């Protein structure tokens, strides 16, 4: 597995990277609570406003695969400071926006900064901490990855109700300034700069591939699946990704080394993370809409209803991290996904326009109790199977798919929500707007239930990387 690199302030480095990533991921969903306010202020429709979230995820999905290359060209210090400064500029631009295009531009600039920070964080954590401390470190990091998008609606709900939505960006900007100052003093260079040849066709294929895929998924919320607006970018995206994959396998120095997927536990762990992020971001966009639109709670109350679920995540993540070496990814995965299935089924069975708020609180707590047991163990188990020289490639591959999962989860959730509303309105023409909205949300939760069942099946195949490698050696010997 290779030894770790000694640095002067490992904990300070970890804290700066995690906080920078947390603010960026918080930004993914922070505007979900404010979409109705922004639509009113700038006179735009829901599908156009939706691009404030989708555009952010789109940039992350395009930029994260390129990050593996950037980490071999620029020092850790350059990437971290660059990521934080770009994020700061994006937050200030969005806070000062006088119209929708400037707000969207600010979001995109902030996403570029976050896209630099996420892969660097994962790679650096694996380099500066020894393997016996990784469980705890990855536990806290898993908390950052899940808590950022999950806390977005809660914190922004309170900010919107007490101040106004631009303050979401002002608070982010304030934290970025503090992090830039801290990073200047503590971040050391730990990555190896090899300056591989930049392959322009790979960058273009990756950008067209992931961009086309997410654009198609996002457009499905407004257009029929059979429309050219959906099918053309979907088809172009899939072809570009296939060509990208073929090209990477043939190159001596690929942009992302797809050979990481030859490690079975890495592949399975990445799939588990993908499904977990799908569920987190689907529920992250559906529940604020349900609480505000169907149950008619204010943004602040809706945010507070989601708080206990986030608190469970906050309390459980370090515990799961500390117990990881004893319990293992397999047991955590199976128990966790069983609880996630129960949480989703609770939503499916209880959601209506009359549901008491406490039932939403309980279901959301159950959901996050299970997700916390799933996410970090899956990620740690996946990365532990890779040799050190593949960390940056594994990190880039995993994080790219996480961003695709986020964009796909958001897009599919909105699409199913819209189609669920339409079919309910046709079946019950006298239904109130609240009943129609609740029916649409409930319909979308059938999708997250199905995904959690797939995750549960996958968790039965998880092994410890050491077991996998021992099995391979014994097969080779035989």
Image (cartoon, rainbow, N blue to C red):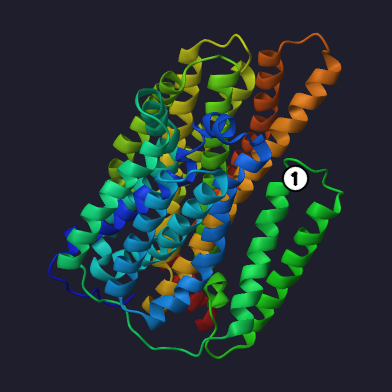
Name the residue at 56% across, 44% down.
100
Provide residue 6's location: percent of width, then percent of height: 17, 74
Name the residue at 85% across, 17% down.
427
Provide residue 117's location: percent of width, then percent of height: 38, 62
**What is the quadrant of residue 78 in the picture?**
bottom left
Provide residue 227's location: percent of width, then percent of height: 86, 49
* Left-right relation of 203 to 193: right
- In this rendering, the count of numbered labels is 1
Q: Name the foreground residue: 161 vs 253.
A: 161
Say whether residue 411 is visible: yes
Q: Quadrant of the C terminus?
A: bottom right
Name the residue at 83% across, 13% down.
429
**Residue where numbered disc 1 is placed:** 220
* Left-right relation of 114 to 289: left
Is 217 drawn above or below residue 205 in the view shown?
A: above
* Left-right relation of 185 to 177: left
Is 249 drawn above or below residue 393 in the view shown?
A: below
Q: Name the foreground residue: 132 vs 304.
A: 304
Name the residue at 66% across, 83% down.
247
Q: Provide the secondary structure element on which disc 1 rests.
A: loop
Q: Name the foreground residue: 472 vs 341.
A: 341
């Amino acid at each position: 597995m290779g030894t770790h690199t000694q640095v002067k302030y490992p904990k300070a480095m970890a804290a700066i990277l995690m906080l920078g990533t947390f603010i960026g991921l918080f930004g993914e969903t922070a505007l979900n609570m404010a979409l109705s306010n922004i639509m009113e202020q700038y006179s735009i429709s829901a599908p156009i406003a939706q691009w404030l979230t989708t555009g952010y995820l789109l940039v992350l999905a395009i930029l994260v695969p390129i990050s593996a290359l950037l980490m071999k060209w620029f020092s850790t210090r350059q990437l971290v400071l660059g990521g934080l400064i770009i994020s700061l500029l994006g937050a200030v631009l969005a806070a000062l926006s006088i119209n929708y295009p400037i707000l969207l531009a600010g979001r995109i600039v902030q996403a570029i900064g976050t896209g630099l920070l996420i892969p660097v964080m994962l790679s650096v954590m694996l380099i500066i901490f020894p393997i016996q401390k990784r469980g705890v470190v990855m536990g806290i990091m898993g908390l950052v990855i899940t808590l950022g998008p999950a806390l977005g609606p809660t914190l922004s709900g309170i900010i919107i109700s007490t101040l106004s939505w631009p303050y979401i960006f002002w608070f982010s900007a304030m934290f970025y300034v503090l992090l830039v100052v801290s990073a200047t003093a503590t971040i050391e260079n730990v990555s190896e700069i090899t300056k591989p040849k930049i392959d322009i066709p790979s960058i273009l294929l990756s950008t067209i591939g992931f961009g086309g895929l997410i654009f198609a998924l996002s457009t499905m919320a407004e257009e029929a699946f059979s429309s050219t607006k959906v099918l053309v970018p979907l088809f172009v995206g899939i072809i570009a990704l296939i060509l990208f994959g073929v090209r990477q396998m043939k190159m001596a120095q690929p942009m992302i080394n797809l050979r990481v997927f030859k490690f079975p536990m890495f592949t399975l762990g990445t799939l588990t993370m993908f499904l977990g992020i799908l569920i987190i971001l689907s529920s992250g966009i559906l529940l604020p809409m349900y609480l505000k639109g169907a149950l008619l709670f204010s943004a602040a109350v809706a945010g507070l209803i989601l708080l206990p679920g986030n608190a469970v995540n906050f309390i459980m993540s370090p515990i799961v991290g500390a117990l990881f070496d004893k319990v293992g990814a397999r047991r955590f995965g199976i128990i966790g996904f069983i609880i996630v299935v129960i949480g989703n089924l609770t939503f499916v069975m209880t959601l209506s326009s009359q549901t008491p708020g406490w039932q939403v609180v309980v279901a959301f707590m159950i959901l996050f109790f299970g997700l916390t047991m799933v996410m970090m163990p899956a990620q740690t188990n996946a990365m532990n199977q890779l040799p050190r020289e593949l960390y940056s490639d594994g990190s880039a591959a995993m994080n790219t798919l996480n961003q695709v999962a986020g964009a796909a989860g958001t897009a599919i959730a909105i699409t199913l929500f819209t189609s669920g509303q339409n079919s309910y309105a046709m079946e019950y023409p006298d239904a109130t707007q609240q009943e129609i909205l609740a029916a649409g949300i409930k319909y979308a939760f059938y999708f997250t239930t199905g995904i959690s069942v797939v995750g549960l099946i996958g968790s039965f195949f998880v092994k410890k990387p050491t077991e996998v490698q021992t099995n391979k050696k014994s097969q080779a010997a035989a």
